[in-house]
C-alpha cells in the first residue's frame, strides 16, 4: 500500500493557504476552522509516515497516539487542545 503522507501534506498546504486568505478577509471563524484542519491533517500525515493509521479529529489525542519514538512537546499538545476548542 502506498504511503499517502505526501498527499495529506499537500492538503495541509491548501488548508493553511485558506486560513491565510480568510484572515485577510477577516473571516475569523474560517481562519480557526482551516487552521484546525491543517493541524489535524499534518498529524495524520505523520501517523501515515510512520506506518500507522489515525482516526478522529482531536489533535491532542492524535499526538498522544503517535509512537513513543516520536517526542511531541507538551506545548504542542496544548496548542492542539486550543485549536479543538474553536
Image: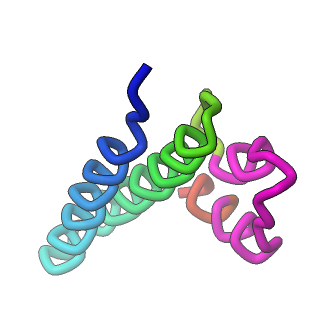
Image coords of residue 32 (percent x, y): 40, 62
- Stretch of the chain drawn in magenta: 59-80
Between 29 and 47, the one nearer to me in the picture: 47
The extreme top residue here reads 1
Within the image, what quadrant is residue 53 found in? top right
Percent position of residue 76, x then y? 69, 71
Q: Residue at x 63, y 50 (%)?
A: 59
Task: Say if the magenta span includes residue 41.
Answer: no
Q: Residue 27 lies in what quarter of the image? A: bottom left
- 68 is higher (above) or lower (below) than 75: above
Q: Is residue 71 left or right of residue 21?
A: right
Residue 31, placed above or below residue 55: below
Q: Residue at x 60, y 53 (%)?
A: 84
Asked where in the image residue 22 lies, by quadrant, the reply is: bottom left
In what quadrant of the picture does the N terminus appear? top left
Image check: 20 left or right of 33? left
- Total tally of numbered discs in the picture: 0
Classify 36 as above or below 67.
below
User: How has the structure been colored for display?
Assistant: rainbow
Q: Nearer the viewer, residue 68 or 43?
A: 68
Residue 64 place in picture, x, y as percent: 80, 49
Horizontal side of 30 relative to 68 (left or right) equals left
At 82% from the left and 71% from the top, the residue drawn is 74
Q: Residue furthest right?
A: 68
- At a point 38% along the width and 35% down the height, the residue shown is 4
* Residue 17: x %, y % from top left: 20, 66
Asked if residue 73 is among those painted magenta in the image, a careful observer would answer yes
Amino acid at each position: 500500500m502506498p504511503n499517502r503522507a505526501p498527499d495529506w501534506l499537500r492538503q495541509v498546504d491548501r488548508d493553511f493557504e485558506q486560513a491565510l486568505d480568510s484572515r485577510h478577509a477577516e473571516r475569523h471563524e474560517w481562519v480557526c476552522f482551516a487552521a484546525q484542519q491543517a493541524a489535524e491533517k499534518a498529524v495524520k500525515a505523520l501517523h501515515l509516515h510512520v506506518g500507522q493509521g489515525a482516526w478522529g479529529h482531536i489533535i491532542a489525542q492524535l499526538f498522544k497516539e503517535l509512537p513513543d519514538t516520536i517526542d511531541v512537546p507538551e506545548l504542542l499538545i496544548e496548542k492542539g487542545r486550543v485549536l479543538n476548542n474553536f
